[in-house]
């Protein structure tokens, strides 16, 4: 259960932006990028930065999955 970032990965792919490029452009740490790849919780600050960078809403980059 939790947030999944499949939508972010798909959006980056469609825009030909690598996760590494996004990380560098936003000044994110490699640890934060690893958290995204592992679908771990992110701070609202990081979510806001990603949304502003891609000009999207949070629902465009993540989805809540209830595994119950």
Image (cartoon, rainbow, N blue to C red):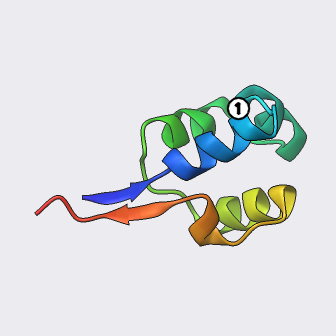
Which residue occupies 70% across, 34% down? 13
Q: Position of residue 45 (x, y in %)?
A: 69, 66
- Work out whether residue 42 or residue 62 is closer to the camera in this orientation and state it: 62
Q: Which residue is mark 1?
A: 19
Which residue occupies 61% across, 49% down? 8
Asked if 36 appears above or below 61 in the picture, the reply is above
Which residue occupies 81% across, 40% down? 15
Asked if 13 appears above or below 48 in the picture, the reply is above
| The image quarter in which residue 60 lies | bottom right
Q: Position of residue 29 (x, y in %)?
A: 70, 36
| Secondary structure of the residue carrying numbered label 1 | helix
Q: Position of residue 28 (x, y in %)?
A: 75, 42
Quadrant of the snapshot with the C terminus: bottom left
- Work out whether residue 37 or residue 59 is closer to the camera in this orientation and state it: 59
Which residue occupies 75% across, 28% down? 18
- Relative to 8, 2 lies left or right: left
| The image quarter in which residue 30 lies | top right
How many numbered circles does the render carry?
1
- Relative to 68, 44 lies left or right: right
């Amino acid at each position: 259960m939790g947030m999944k970032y499949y939508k972010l990965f798909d959006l980056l792919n469609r825009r030909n932006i690598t996760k590494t490029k996004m990380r560098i452009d936003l000044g994110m740490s490699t640890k934060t990028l690893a958290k995204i790849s592992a679908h771990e919780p992110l701070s609202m600050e990081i979510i806001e930065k990603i949304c502003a960078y891609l000009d999207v809403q949070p629902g465009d980059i993540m989805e809540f999955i209830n595994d119950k």
